[in-house]
């Protein structure tokens, strides 16, 4: 006789097994542990069939789904039952609105990204991270002391030769760029009440000139 096995801990239906005839009682069957002759209900998507206290029930089953405790805090569901998702959200909650203090911090981050993100001078891509800025200052100081010098300058495309006038132009362009970034930072911080999102701040810095 077919009987229906269930998990010994959760009661979840696991499949059909067989009961053997009872050799000591004609017409009776030896039902294995954790099995029942009671027929389970038909499967329903999103539910598990669970045998508890002699009856089958359909229980919510969210296993394999991702729910959320909060924004950026996902939870992989690996247990059956409504309790597995109690207090969780099925969709990721939106990020909390940034405070004015958060936005001011982001202004500095946006300025730094823009400042060190590089510029283009006469078709040449110039790196403007802090190390490169220091090298440009050093090269400019060198040609001021040695006006006839020709500098080997390494770009992303390879080495180029720059004379004193070109090095001076490079230094002035990079200095102008850096100063423009700090001017924009002061401007945005001074008007921080007008900004509601980090994206708005990023857009403000995107407008800072990067080609000279």
Image (tube, rainbow, N blue to C red):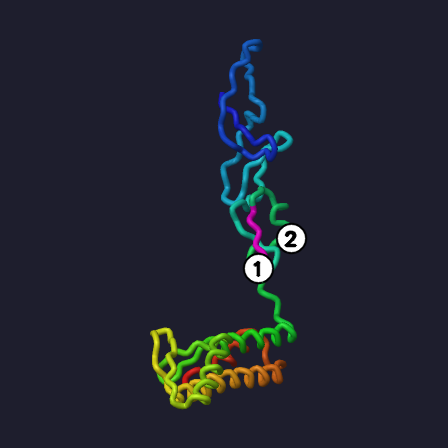
Which of the 4 quarters of the picture holds residue 101? bottom right
Q: Is residue 28 left or right of residue 148?
A: right
To which residue does mark 1 refer? 72
Seen in the picture, residue 33 relative to 135 is either above or below; the reply is above
Q: Residue furthest top?
A: 24
Is 59 situated above or below 1?
Answer: below
Which residue is at the front of the view, 132 or 63? 132
Mark 1 neighbour class, 10 Å CA radius: few under 14, some 14 to 19, many 20 or more: few
- The residue depicted at 54 percent of the width and 28 percent of the height is 5
Q: What residue do we see at 35% from left, 76% from top?
A: 159
Query: What quarter of the picture does the C terminus occupy?
Result: bottom left
In terms of secondary structure, where does tag 1 sit? loop
Q: How far apart in space, not on screen, are marks 1 and 2 (Cα)? A: 16 Å
Say left or right for 153 vs 8: left
Q: Nearer the viewer, residue 38 or 22?
A: 22
Main secondary structure found in the magenta portion = strand
Q: Residues within 10 Å of mark 2 (few under 14, many from 20)?
A: few
Occupied quadrant, residue 59 = top right
Q: In the rendered image of this protein, does residue 83 appear above or below residue 154?
A: above
Q: Residue at x 56, y 35 (%)?
A: 12
Residue that label 2 marks = 87
Which contiguous range is marked in magenta?
73-77
* Whether label 1 touches label 2, CB < 8 Å: no
In front here: 5 or 141?
A: 141
Q: Is residue 146 magenta?
A: no
Q: Earlier in the sequence, mark 1 or mark 2?
A: 1
Q: Provide residue 64's location: percent of width, then percent of height.
A: 51, 46
Residue 66 in percent (x, y) is at: 54, 51
- Residue 92, x across and y down, in percent: 56, 59
């Amino acid at each position: 006789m077919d009987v229906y096995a269930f998990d010994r801990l959760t009661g979840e239906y696991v499949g059909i097994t067989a009961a053997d005839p009872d050799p000591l009682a004609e017409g009776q069957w030896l039902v294995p542990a954790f099995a029942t002759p009671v027929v389970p209900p038909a499967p329903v998507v999103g539910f598990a069939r669970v045998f508890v206290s002699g009856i089958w029930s359909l229980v919510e089953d969210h296993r394999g789904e991702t729910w959320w405790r909060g924004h950026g805090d996902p939870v992989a569901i690996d247990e059956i039952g409504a309790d597995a998702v109690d207090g969780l959200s099925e969709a990721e909650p939106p990020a909390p609105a940034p405070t004015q203090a958060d936005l001011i911090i982001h202004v500095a981050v946006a300025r730094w990204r823009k400042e060190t993100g590089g510029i283009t001078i006469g078709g040449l891509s110039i790196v403007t991270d802090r190390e490169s800025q220091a090298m440009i200052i050093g090269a400019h100081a060198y040609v001021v002391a040695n006006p006839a010098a020709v500098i080997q300058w390494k770009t992303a495309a390879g080495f180029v030769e720059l004379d004193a006038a070109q090095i001076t132009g490079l230094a002035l362009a990079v200095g102008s760029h850096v100063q423009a970034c700090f001017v924009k930072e002061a401007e945005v911080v001074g008007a921080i009440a007008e900004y509601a999102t980090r994206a708005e701040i990023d857009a403000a810095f995107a407008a800072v000139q990067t080609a000279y």
